[in-house]
């Protein structure tokens, strides 16, 4: 990318890759994750250095290591999700302390589909709030990549997840993945439905990755002392709001978390990954790849993701 903008600003080009520097490893990608955050970087909503690459997630094999690398060795199967753009490539250099050894039973496609989205659900459900059995939560975009993992993980924890989705087909998908209730927010008023489902009480936590379009409605779904977790902006960023909005609804809490702060030290990252690999290896959470695109088809991949045409996780194949 030389400039930010629509999908057309992504160019498929050859670039020279230097040998890995001190502390770096070169990874040959077998599969690359496609995530909504890539759209934010492409459009310029999130800043990045230009010219530069895109993509924050991949899985593959270590081809070479730089000086002082202890975390991985040549030939290792690895995966990562890290806030360093450049994953949309056949090979890249990356700090080795961001790489995780991939268990034998998890394939490269699954790994590229689940690292960022699965680690996100891990911290949202275990760290941002420690959910417990019997909790009732609202989770927007429940048939998306993060959403289908969240539906299943909530079921594992005994949490009643009320999911919102944009079509009846997506509603069926979220239900099949374990959502206790699903609301099609294009047809129904989600605030009224949440009040009905919870007998007027509201939910204890809302996970809102839609942003601008749902923010105020999400606050209205919370029970007193509830927690608003605003973790994305698929419809645009949340406009400034007054803190009195939290007080008048019953002393609400609010947080705006990012995976990259929760995973910013190696021991947290390893713990979170062990938890994710655990539920995926046991089969409790299944991460299917719903869309596969060749790397040179990435513009189409972005167009479909932004047009809400995808479900579940998507990968790019180099
Ligand atoms: P998804 O597969 O969930 O795709 C986004 C979905 O959002 C769409 O399919 C659509 O579902 C819904 N949506 C609602 N309004 C819009 C709109 N105006 N434009 C586009 N989509 C809309 O993407 P991901 O799984 O990659 O990510 C989900 C969200 O989680 C994103 O907002 C992402 O930024 C955020 N995220 C945040 C992280 C963090 O740590 N803070 C980490 C990872 C992801 P429907 O048709 O059902 O409404």
Image (tube, rainbow, N blue to C red):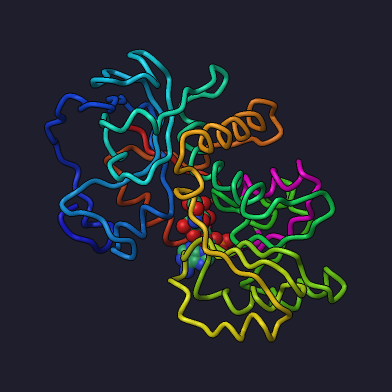
Residue 45 location in percent, x, y?
33, 65
- The one nearer the camera, 302 or 115, is 115
Quarter of the picture holding the C terminus: top left
- The one nearer the camera, 150 or 80, is 80
**Seen from this angle, which residue lies furthest right?**
199
- The one nearer the camera, 47 or 186, is 47
Residue 64 location in percent, x, y?
26, 18
Q: Residue drawn at (78%, 72%), measured in percent from left and top?
A: 202
Read off the magenta span: 148-168
Residue 193 location in percent, x, y?
76, 73
The magenta stretch spans residue 253 = no
Residue 226 location in percent, x, y?
72, 69
Position of 87 with respect to 280 (left or right) is: left
Identify whether 142 is placed above or below 284. Answer: below
Identify whether 134 is placed above or below 185. Answer: above
Task: Tell me if residue 310 can be seen.
Answer: no
**On the image, which quarter does residue 88 sit in?**
top left
- The one nearer the camera, 240 or 221, is 240
Q: Residue drawn at (50%, 38%), measured in percent from left and top?
A: 115
Task: Tell me if residue 5 can be seen.
Answer: yes
Q: How many marks?
A: 0
The magenta stretch spans residue 165 = yes
Position of 259 with respect to 133 (left or right) is: left
Position of 212 with respect to 21 (left or right) is: right
Q: Residue drawn at (27%, 41%), measured in percent from left and top?
A: 86
Identify whether 1 is placed above or below 217. Answer: above
Identify whether 316 is placed above or below 199. Answer: above
């Amino acid at each position: 990318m030389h400039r930010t903008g629509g999908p057309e600003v992504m160019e498929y080009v050859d670039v020279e890759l230097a040998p890995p520097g001190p502390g770096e490893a070169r990874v040959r990608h077998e599969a690359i994750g496609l995530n909504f955050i890539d759209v934010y970087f492409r459009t310029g909503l999130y800043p990045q250095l230009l010219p530069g690459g895109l993509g924050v997630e991949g899985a593959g094999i270590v081809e070479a290591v730089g000086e002082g690398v202890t975390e991985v060795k040549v030939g290792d199967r690895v995966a990562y999700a890290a806030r360093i753009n450049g994953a949309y490539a056949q090979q890249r250099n990356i700090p080795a302390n961001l790489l995780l050894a991939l268990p034998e039973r998890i394939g490269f496609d699954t790994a590229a589909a689940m690292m960022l989205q699965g680690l996100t659900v891990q911290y949202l459900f275990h760290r941002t709030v420690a959910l417990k059995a019997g909790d009732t939560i609202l989770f927007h975009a429940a048939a998306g990549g993060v959403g289908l993992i969240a539906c299943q993980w909530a079921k594992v924890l005994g949490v009643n997840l009320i999911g919102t989705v944009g079509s009846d087909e997506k509603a069926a998908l979220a239900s099949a993945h374990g959502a206790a209730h699903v609301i099609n927010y294009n047809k129904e008023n989600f605030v009224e439905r949440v009040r009905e489902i919870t007998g007027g009480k509201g939910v204890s936590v809302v996970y809102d990755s839609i942003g601008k379009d749902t923010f105020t409605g999400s606050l209205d779904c919370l029970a007193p002392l509830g927690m608003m977790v605003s973790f994305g902006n698929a419809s645009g960023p949340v406009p400034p709001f007054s803190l009195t909005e939290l007080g008048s609804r019953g002393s609400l809490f609010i947080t705006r978390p990012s995976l990259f702060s929760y995973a910013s030290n190696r021991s947290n990252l390893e713990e979170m990954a062990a938890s994710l690999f655990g539920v995926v290896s046991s089969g409790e959470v299944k991460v299917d790849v719903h869309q596969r695109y060749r790397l040179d088809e990435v513009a189409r991949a972005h167009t479909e993701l932004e047009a809400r045409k995808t479900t579940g996780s998507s990968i790019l194949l180099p």
